[in-house]
Image (cartoon, rainbow, N blue to C red):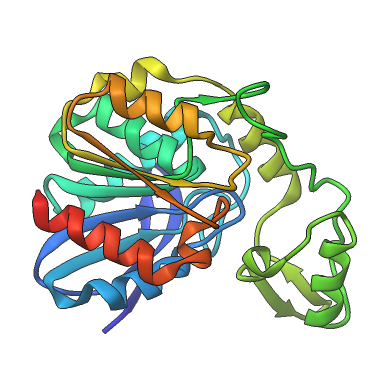
Amino acid sequence: MIAEAHLTLRGRRFSFLDFGGAGTPILALHGHFGRARMFAPLAAALGPGHRLVALDQRGHGLSDRGGSFTREDYIEDAAELLRALGLGAAVVLGHSMGGVNAYQLAARYPELVRALIIEDIGAVVREPEVQHPVLDVSRWPVHTATREALEAAIEAQGIPDASYFMNSAIEDADGWRLLFDYADMMASQEALLGDFWNDWLASSCPALLLHGQESPLLSASMARTMAERRPRTDWKTFHGCGHWIHDDDPAGFAEAIGEFLARI
């Protein structure tokens, strides 16, 4: 049974989903523009043998907007959630920005992280290693009359498929809007730019790196080098998939994670 809950951490109100289960705890961290509920299909596939807890990270989903969006902010939020829920050493899964948060969390607090699962993000997040690392959302529509109009307006900004972003669409008194603030997202993306090799190499727990063959954010050469340089790291490429492996191949995504969890 899915339990939606709220918790105040470090003076901010956070929303999270606890998908239940009595087995291995897994903390799931979404990427920019995402929200906790994107992990529902994975939680269903893994079943009750695992307890997946997914956080709406700061500025995302139903968690508080505004404030700062530094690397340390995200890391401390995740650490405080693990402590507050008493999950002990958890497997930490992160997609995109959430993946950097995950391996930086393991670098700072190895006692909180039993293993890492990183979905399609590298040890360097900046050009030329990454194509267009910042998505300019500053001119996206604030409100539209219908959900369909909001989706069309986003795609008119050059987004081929707005479905990922539409997971954060809600209806309010003024029409349809996205849950996140555009200025927050621009600040957070800018704060993610950098070279994080030291953080990637700082932890020693088992890790699984998932790479979308067609992703503009993680190249095959970067994924290979990350796996070669860090001990106890498995690497899997998903052919025909882009940056959102969990959407492009949900069954394969769940299978790879399930196999990794069984090994550890």
- The correct choice, above or below, for 35 with respect to 135 in the image is below
239 or 139: nearer the eye? Answer: 239
244 or 50: nearer the eye? Answer: 244
User: Seen from this angle, which residue lies furthest front?
Assistant: 239
Q: Residue at x 90, y 62 (%)?
A: 156
The picture quadrant where one finds residue 27 is bottom left
Q: Residue at x 43, y 28 (%)?
A: 72
99 or 260: nearer the eye? Answer: 260
Relative placement, left or right, of 216 versus 98 is: right
Residue 261 lies, in percent from the top left, at 16, 55
Relative placement, left or right, of 186 versus 48 is: right
- The correct choice, above or below, for 57 with respect to 198 in the image is below
The picture quadrant where one finds residue 235 is top left
Q: Residue at x 62, y 24 (%)?
A: 126
Residue 159 lies, in percent from the top left, at 79, 57
Residue 110 lies, in percent from the top left, at 18, 30
Relative placement, left or right, of 152 versus 116 is: right
